[in-house]
Image: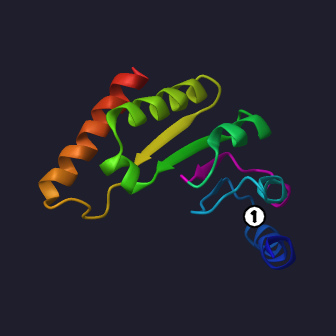
Amino acid sequence: MFREFVLPAYRQIAASEGKVVGFHTCGNLVPVVHDLLGVFPGIQTLDVSAWNDFEKLDAMLDPEIGFWLGFKNTFVLAGAPAQHRELLERVARLGRRRKVGVCAQAIVRLHETYEENLSRVNAFIRLARETFA
């Protein structure tokens, strides 16, 4: 469906609007990323949502393309610190190869109070800063 309907529209956008340098999707890019880059060869950054295997994408793509990684809000707010650390260490390794940005999403009220939500996202951010230092 992507190749039949979306790619022709993207080709038209590229022809009409010019160079596309960034791309956002909340979906999985892995099956279509080469098609996407074929239509938008000037892409410099990809928003890589949590539904992607960012290490698989890393192996598939030129390291000159930066990744802006997003994490699921439920992972940020409810994941165990050990899970957070493991993922953030993987991101840190990725950052040695390519430009990486991180988005700690938390726009849901998952816990009883907003204070609890904020406490958890702040703990995640502190751990990310420690891991990336």
The answer to which of 41 and 122 lies nearer the viewer is 122
Could you tell whether 113 is left or right of 68 in the image?
left
In the image, what residue occupies the spot 34% across and 28% down?
Answer: 129
Q: Residue at x 75, y 35 (%)?
A: 59
Q: Which residue is mark 1?
A: 18
Describe residue 92's horizontal placement relative to residue 1 as left or right: left
Front in this rendered view, residue 24 or 113? 113
The residue positioned 55% from the left and 36% from the top of the image is 100
Residue 117 location in percent, x, y? 21, 53
Q: Tell me which corner region of the image, top left, top right, bottom left or bottom right, holds residue 62.
A: top right
| Magenta-span inclusion, residue 89 | no
Q: In the picture shown, does residue 3 fall above or below 72?
A: below
Classify residue 55 as left or right of residue 129: right
Q: Amino acid at mark 1?
A: Gly
- In the rendered structure, which segment of residues is drawn in magenta? 38-50
The residue at the point 62 percent across, 63 percent down is 27
Q: Where residue 118 appears, x then y in whole percent? A: 20, 50
Quarter occupied by the N terminus: bottom right
**Where does residue 52 sit, x and y in percent of width and height?**
62, 51
Count of marks overlaid on the render: 1
Q: Position of residue 78 (x, y in %)?
A: 32, 49
Q: Is residue 31 above or below residue 124?
A: below
- Specify the quadrant that holds the C terminus: top left
Q: Would you call the spot at circle 1 few (<14 residues within 10 Å), some (14-19), or many (20 or more)?
A: few
